[in-house]
Amino acid sequence: EAAAPKSAKSRLQEWSQRHRGVRPIYELVSSHGPAHAQQFTVAVIVGTDRLATGSGSSRQRAEEHAAQAALEHVAEVGA
């Protein structure tokens, strides 16, 4: 039985600890909209670098999108 694919947050945490020696921090940048349809924007910070932001209908989804964007960023720059 194949293992479920790892989330972007899990992969970013592994990368961050391996390459930077720290865990990523997710910081709420903004939330707006009515309570039943809020949109959240979250930034992911590794060490002193703000790597990316992501948005979603929940804070968890926004964090996942930010982690995915951060992984794409580090793959591009070879960090």
Image (cartoon, rainbow, N blue to C red):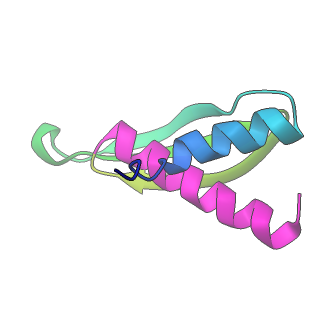
Give the residue at the far left of this rendering: 36
Q: Would you say residue 75 sits in the magenta stretch?
A: yes
Q: Measuring 75% from the left and 45% from the top, which residue is drawn there? A: 50
Q: Would you say residue 52 sits in the magenta stretch?
A: no
Instruction: Locate residue 15 relative to residue 30 in the image: left or right.
Output: right
Give the residue at the far bottom of this rendering: 76
Image coordinates for residue 28, horizontal then vertical, percent: 50, 34
Which residue occupies the foreground of this view, 34 or 17?
17
Magenta region, main secondary structure: helix
Residue 72, compared with residue 71, is above or below; it is: below
Instruction: Locate residue 67 relative to residue 13 in the image: left or right.
Output: left
Which residue occupies the foreground of this view, 3 or 56?
3
Q: Measuring 87% from the left and 36% from the top, which residue is drawn there? A: 20
- How many labels sit on residues? 0
Q: Quadrant of residue 12?
A: top right
Q: Measuring 68% from the left and 33% from the top, which residue is drawn there? A: 24
Which residue occupies the foreground of this view, 21 or 5?
5
Which residue occupies the foreground of this view, 63 or 71?
71
Q: Which residues are magenta?
A: 58-79
Image coordinates for residue 6, horizontal then vertical, percent: 49, 48
Image coordinates for residue 2, horizontal then vertical, percent: 39, 53
Where, quadrant-wise, is the C terminus in this rendering? bottom right
Instruction: Locate residue 42 relative to residue 56 in the image: left or right.
Output: right
Q: Measuring 67% from the left and 58% from the top, which residue is drawn there? A: 71
Q: Quadrant of residue 26?
A: top right
